[in-house]
């Protein structure tokens, strides 16, 4: 089954210098296991190819039903020196939620 990430999660994003920070939160507690299984570092790196020039790190927050991703070398040097339109990474969460995931499970959304 193919789903869009926005169907099972919401997200927030921001910056720490040149690193974009994207938190992805399950819309329901039962969706967290899908995020943990399918929203991998490799999948996120591929989705942000061309935007993220550095490594991608993932941190699990199961008590919050969330994953946090750091996208290094993403913001053109950071807010004070970047010429990018979104030097603080505020739109990265919208980019993340457009991702499609191929999952083995069947969901009633």
Image: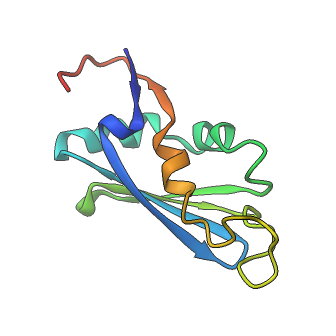
Q: Which colour scheme is used?
A: rainbow
Quadrant in the picture for residue 67: bottom left
Q: Residue at position x 75%, y 85% from top? A: 80
Q: Quadrant of the C terminus?
A: top left
| Residue with the most extreme front position | 85
Q: In this view, does 69 lie above or below 40?
A: below
| 93 sits to left or right of 4 | right
Numbered circles on residues, count:
0
Q: Quadrant of the N terminus?
A: top left
Quadrant in the picture for residue 104: top left
Q: In this view, does 97 lie above or below 81?
A: above
Q: Where is residue 54 drawn, in percent x and y?
A: 77, 57
Q: Residue at position x 74%, y 50% from top? A: 51
Q: Where is residue 90 drawn, in percent x and y?
A: 54, 65
Quadrant in the picture for residue 55: bottom right
Q: Where is residue 83 drawn, in percent x and y?
A: 82, 70
Q: Where is residue 65 drawn, in percent x and y?
A: 27, 55
Q: Residue at position x 80%, y 74% from top? A: 82
Q: Residue at position x 38%, y 25% from top? A: 3
Return the residue nearer the eye: 62 or 44: 44
């Amino acid at each position: 089954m193919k789903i869009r990430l926005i169907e099972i999660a919401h997200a927030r994003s921001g910056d720490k210098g040149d690193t974009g920070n994207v938190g992805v939160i399950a819309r329901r507690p039962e969706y967290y296991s899908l995020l943990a299984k399918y929203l991998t570092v490799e999948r996120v790196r591929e989705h942000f190819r061309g935007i993220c020039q550095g490594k991608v790190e993932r941190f699990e927050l199961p008590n919050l039903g969330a994953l946090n991703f750091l996208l290094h070398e993403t913001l053109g040097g950071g807010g004070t020196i970047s010429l990018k339109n979104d030097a603080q990474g505020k739109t990265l969460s919208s980019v993340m939620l457009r991702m499609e995931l191929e999952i083995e499970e069947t969901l009633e959304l």
